[in-house]
Amino acid sequence: MRRKLVYVVGIVAVAVAGVVYTLVAGNEPLLGLDLQGGASVVLEPTRVAEPEELDVAVEIIRNRVDGLGVAEPEISTQGDNILVQLPGVDEQQRALDLVGQTAELRFRPVLSVVAESSLEGADADETLLDLFAFSEGDVAAGADVVLPQYDDDRDIAFRYQLGPTAVAGDGLEGAVAQFHSFIGWHVAPTFKPGAEGIDLFNEVSRRCHSRAPSCPTGQVAIELDNEVVSAPTVQADNALFEPFERSGITISGGFSEQEARDVALVLDYGALPVELEAQQSQIVSASLGTDALSAGSLAGLIGLGLVSVYLLTYYRLLGLVAIASLGLSGAMLWAIIAWLGETQGLALTLAGVTGLIVAIGVSVDSNIVYFEHLKEDVRSGRTLRSAVDRAFPVAFSTIVKADFASLIAAAVLYFLTVGQVRGFALYLGLATILDLVATYFFMGPLIGLMSRSSGLYAHPGRFGIPAKMAGAQQPGATT
Amino acid sequence: MTGGPLGVLASVYRGEQQIDFPRLWKRALIGSLLAVLASLGSFLVRGVDLGIEFEGGTSWEVPAPGVSVAEARDALRGTGAADGKIQTVGGDTIRVRSDIEGPEAVDGVRSALADLAGVTGNDVSVTTVGPSWGAEVTSKARNALIAFFALIAVYIAMRLEWKMAVGALLAVIHDIVVSVGFYSVFQFEITPATVIAFLTIMGYSLYDTIVVYDKVREVVGRVSATGRYTYTEMMNLSLNQVLMRSVNTSITSMIPVASMLVIGSFVLGAVTLQEFAIALLVGIVAGTYSSLFVAAAVVARMKEREPAYVEIAERVRQRGGAAGGGTRMVATDDAVLGEAAAAKRSATARRSGPAPRAAAGSAQGAIPPRPRKKKKR
């Protein structure tokens, strides 16, 4: 008796404390991008990557995303993949492109150039075609390569035969986008001082300016992700300075403002240690997301309302307890979801919401299992009070068995699958555990307490137990 | 109060209605077999409409009220997606599926759709899936499924008994086959949302079956002491006792899902919700049905083969068994045998007239209900 009271008061206190904490701390559930719009991409390395490489890649991607100003990005590794979620991001496609870009920058001497137009048509020179066949795959930094340069329509404009890399992206310290009235938007990278950066660049400039055999064209190609951005001819330096003792350069490639800013952004945070390929990308428009959210919430509320009406009609006071129990686990769930969102960056997705809706069914069932046990016992001649004492352990053992099956399902799905299914499993599992808690500490003890109340004892009808049934053991009561 | 459909409802409410489940099992078997065969047949002949998540490709979705599929196709000419799959979903959303590749091509379709619907590019939702990713997702799902079945089988065998594990798994497989068949017959697209719904169906079906089995075990534990009833008869009693639970749980589970379907698809046009809800509704109905009819029938059939029950069945048959071909009902007094019986008898004896016929095999001593105290704190 006293223990029941302690349980009920205790669990209500815990739930209230959870809600108060959530309100005071200002925690709010973090909505997944399918509920608020945004973009997500799963990136897979094109080769087998070390865990350390993936960690570095995640760090770089996080920096880039922060550079874009996305509010609550979630970047994590799942197995060999990197999962990037950008809820609420505006320019979704651009964000996805930026995130996955390798941003491998290389400066190479140009050995020869040919315009794409001269390779087309019937009179195309076979040997020239052979010579300018594009290099395949991830081109080694130290080898000679043939790479394309694209025009504004993304058609190939030129093919460049390039010598070994002189300076790579790791020779850079940072980069900014700048505007100049002559050359328009351009990118100004800063080299690291000394032999790690600027010296290497000046060395290749010197070579090209003197048209050395390793740089017969006098051009230095700026290569980003296996494409030539531009290939300026090295000019004699400003006479005021020592020849080829520059401290910095500018890269102009006919950029628009946004392109210049994007290139600067990716150069600033360095190249990814491994090339990544988008395996799955998703862009959810904000309107679709909010539609789904409002539809889901509305459906949930209406569903809950109807379930409440049904429970009240069928089980009367017991139904009220069931609704209170549902509300209690709902309050705890809300506090936990908000806490997870705030501290762990775990978002509630549409799949998660489905898990919760399913959990409503499971939670209500825990109540129904007990109530039907009660009715069964009363029907077989027990008083309400003794039925309450006997039926709860039996019903609870059933509930534990069934809920455990749900928990096993949730755990297997959480650990063995990817993507949306995990969210579903997480919230289904969470809600199932809370259902057990609410049933054991709240619903059971509360009904035990209520059965002691003399007003109720005399009126089993208020428990949704028909008076006729409660008195069924009297001879002639049944037909 | 009595007579008419209301009378039946009222007696169901009071739990007095006795349904002859074993008799229904035979009809259910035919029905289930037909449903499973139809599902498998449709699956083999028509296959299922797998979404891009499993096959790779790109899909676009844009809210475009009043735009027809033909108009959308016209608008997409030149983007490479015009010969893709174009459909209207959820009333006024245009969905396009195509396997064109490359960010530029994808963006081209996106802006073409935005122009068509008179919205900005940011209002178009795009999902792109690489072909190998789909294969990876599928293989992970398959592994998860195998692990799940193995674990659940072990779990049920440990907590209940292995015959029940067999019955539960058969019931789950039945539900999944029928649900997939439903998707195949109506050619609904199978998306990750659908897969989640199927997983839910599995979980729900198992949950329901375990509740039923636990009741069976409880009843058998009590009633088998009499040694006078076959397993099927005891199963029948359990199912009747658990029926209202099943009905009520199905109704309360279906209400939120149905409101998701109605609100989601008809009122607000949220396509994803609609896809969830259809599969869930089918699954809840199938899950409730299969626990009472498939799972129970399988276990009863297997248990009747056990020597102890063969013997009982033989005795019952010699005594004339159930008259009229139906399943013999367990007498009310036997149904509450065990520790409940003694208490019950003493309670009824004190309160009302003649004590019921004494039944053998009372487990524990009679503990009369405590007298009511005026105030207990």
Image (cartoon, coloured by chain):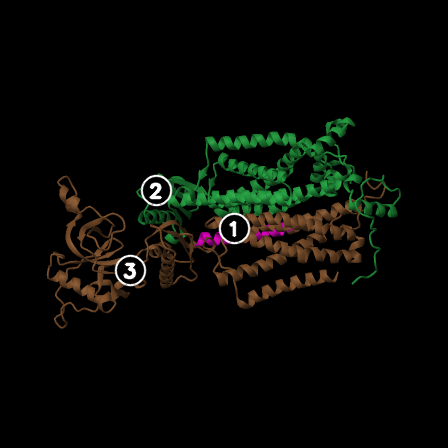
Chain colours: A brown, B green
Judge the density around disc 1: few (<14), some (14-19), many (≥20) Cα neighbours within 10 Å. many
SS of the residue under disc 2: loop
Residue occupied by mark 2: B81
For this rendering, which residue is in front, A75 or B123?
A75
| Mark closer to the observer (2, 1) | 1
Whether discs 2 and 3 lie on one chain: the answer is no
| Residue kind at label 1, given as amino acid type | Phe
Which residues fall within the magenta stretch? A286-307
Circle 3 sits on which residue?
Answer: A263
Dominant SS of magenta comes to: helix
The residues tagged by marks 2 and 1 sit, at their Cα atoms, a distance apart of 32 Å
Kindly report the distance in space between the C-alpha atoms of the residues bearing marks 1 and 3: 38 Å
In percent of width and height, residue A462 lies at: 75, 52
Residue A355 visible in this rendered orientation of the protein: yes
Q: What's the chain of the residue with tag 2?
A: B
The chain holding disc 3 is: A
Q: Nearer the viewer, residue A424 or B279?
A: A424
Query: Between tags 2 and 3, which lies in front?
Result: 3
Q: Is residue B16 visible?
A: no
Q: Which chain is disc 1 placed on?
A: A
Q: Name the disc covering residue A424, or none.
A: 1
Q: Residues within 10 Å of mark 3 (few under 14, many from 20)?
A: many
